[in-house]
């Protein structure tokens, strides 16, 4: 039949055009995968410090007044480009001081020893073994790092929902309500700043540990802070924990903080 | 012929006779308008950007990977770097030729490519992409003296 053969011709021509057109597309798709995989290696730096769960012991017996803690706070805030906001509601803090009653509301009594009553306590992210902020994060921007137990943040991924802030029982997280850059007095150009709309907190100086340095606050602490591996029975922190009575913040919540206080 | 076919033919005739000129004119006008940007700008494509390398970058000859790869896939590379450093705490990158680099946009990439305006921005502007890297990463980690 004449009409059906014309129809057949057109169909075949269409299929042929499709086939010719599909080839370059398939080539591109095939080339896009596996081009570099396996050709490079990723590894730890030779000098990097290693631990299963980093932990900190704060010897509050050595603290008398706020000026004892000040160098640690400023060391941290300086190297991490933490802005100094004028408005208290916009405040960003990684490490700060707190009264005993606020730091340890579940471990207070009516009549307390005067030293504990009057000295400032250094508080920071507890890098919990069971971190509630990680469970709250919908994008996995904050996560418990398998390799060393640090509760890390991937700022690229943070959408600023602030669920983590609501979940953290220690108030360790701050939100950038404004672009923080104009409020950074001295910029450390080797560490990124943050942008408006992300949450931030202490990172246990992950960037320093990776190059074999102790956290900045520990370095500036004059022996008040000790840093080490909680899961290594011979580490400096475990030695201190063995020989001293320590408390942790809001222990009853079951978050297992990794910051211990000798009182 | 069935009734349906007659009806269709009738319909077709009405269409052809009455509205042909309007429809053809409308189509021509529409096609002209639609393709206007293409023929108006034909042969006037902006030339590709010319990048300036810093002395340090010239001296190094090759980036962490071959130039063609870097040009096309530096964003994928940075993504691998970010993932590795932040999530796995591995911060050393050993390229296929065995050279090791610290994985850091701020301290490795921008150390050599310290001329963001003449390097990064040139291509990004040309390709009309607006990466937000520099909202956080500071573009000049070490001042050029």
Image: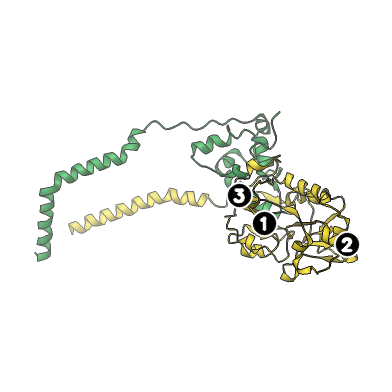
Instruction: Give the farthest residue toward the right.
Output: A243
Residue A161 in the figure: left or right of residue A217: left
A75 vs A56: above or below: above
Residue drawn where x is 62% and y is 57% of the image: A141
Foreground label between 3 and 1: 1
Tag 2 and tag 3, C-beta contact below 8 Å: no
* Distance CA(mark 2)–CA(mark 3): 40 Å
Q: What is the crowding at mark 1: few (fewer than 14 residues within 10 Å), some, or many (at least 20)?
A: many
Residue drawn where x is 69% and y is 54% of the image: A201
Q: What is the crowding at mark 2: few (fewer than 14 residues within 10 Å), some, or many (at least 20)?
A: some
Indicate the secondary structure of the residue bearing disc 2. helix
Q: Which mark is residue B79?
A: 3
- Report whether mark 3 lies on the same chain as mark 1: no
B6 vs B105: above or below: below
Colour applied to chain B: green
Indicate the secondary structure of the residue bearing disc 1. loop
Q: Quadrant of residue A259?
A: bottom right
Nearer-the-camera pick, A189 or B6: A189
Give x and y (percent) for residue B24: 18, 44
Q: Quadrant of residue A179?
A: top right
Residue drawn where x is 63% and y is 47% of the image: A194
* Distance CA(mark 1)–CA(mark 2): 28 Å
Give x and y (percent) for residue A163: 60, 61
Label 3 resides on the chain identified as B
* Residue that label 2 marks: A240
The C terminus of chain A: image quadrant:
bottom right
Q: Which mark is residue A173?
A: 1
* Distance CA(mark 3)–CA(mark 1): 25 Å
Task: State which chain is coloured yellow.
Answer: A
């Amino acid at each position: 039949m004449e009409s059906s053969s014309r129809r057949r011709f057109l169909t075949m021509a269409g299929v042929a055009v499709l086939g010719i057109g599909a080839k370059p597309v398939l080539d591109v798709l095939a080339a896009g995968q596996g081009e570099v995989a396996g050709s490079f290696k990723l590894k730890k730096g030779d000098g990097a410090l290693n631990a299963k769960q980093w932990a900190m012991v704060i010897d509050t017996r050595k603290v008398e007044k706020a000026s004892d803690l000040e160098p640690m706070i400023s060391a941290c805030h300086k190297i991490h480009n933490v802005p100094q906001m004028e408005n208290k509601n916009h405040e960003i803090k990684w490490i700060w001081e707190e009264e005993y009653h606020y730091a340890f509301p579940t471990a207070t009594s009516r009549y307390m020893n005067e030293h504990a009553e009057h000295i400032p306590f250094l508080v920071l992210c507890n890098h919990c073994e069971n971190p509630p902020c990680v469970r709250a994060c919908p994008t996995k921007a904050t996560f418990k790092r398998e390799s060393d137990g640090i509760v890390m943040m991937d700022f690229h991924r943070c959408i600023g929902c602030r669920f983590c802030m609501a979940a953290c029982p220690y108030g360790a997280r701050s939100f950038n309500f404004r672009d923080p850059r104009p409020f950074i007095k001295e910029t450390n150009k080797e560490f990124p700043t943050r942008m408006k709309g992300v949450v931030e907190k202490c990172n246990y100086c992950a960037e320093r540990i990776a190059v074999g340095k102790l956290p900045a606050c520990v370095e500036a602490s004059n022996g008040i802070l000790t840093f080490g591996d909680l899961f290594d029975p011979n580490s400096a922190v475990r030695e201190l924990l063995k020989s001293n009575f320590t408390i942790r913040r809001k222990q009853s919540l079951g978050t297992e903080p990794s910051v211990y206080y000798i009182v | 012929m069935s009734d349906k076919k007659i009806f269709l033919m009738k319909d077709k005739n009405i269409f052809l006779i009455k509205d042909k000129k309007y429809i053809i004119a409308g189509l021509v006008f529409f096609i002209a308008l639609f393709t206007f940007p293409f023929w108006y700008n034909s042969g006037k494509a902006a030339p590709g950007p010319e990048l300036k390398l810093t002395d340090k970058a010239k001296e190094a000859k090759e980036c962490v990977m071959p130039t063609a790869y870097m040009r096309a896939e530096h964003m994928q590379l940075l993504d691998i770097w970010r993932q590795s450093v932040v999530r796995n705490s591995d911060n050393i990158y050993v390229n296929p030729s065995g050279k090791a680099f610290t994985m850091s946009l701020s301290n490795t990439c921008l150390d050599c490519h310290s001329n963001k305006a003449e390097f990064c921005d040139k291509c990004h502007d040309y390709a009309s992409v607006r990466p937000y890297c520099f909202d956080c990463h500071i573009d000049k980690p070490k001042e050029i003296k």
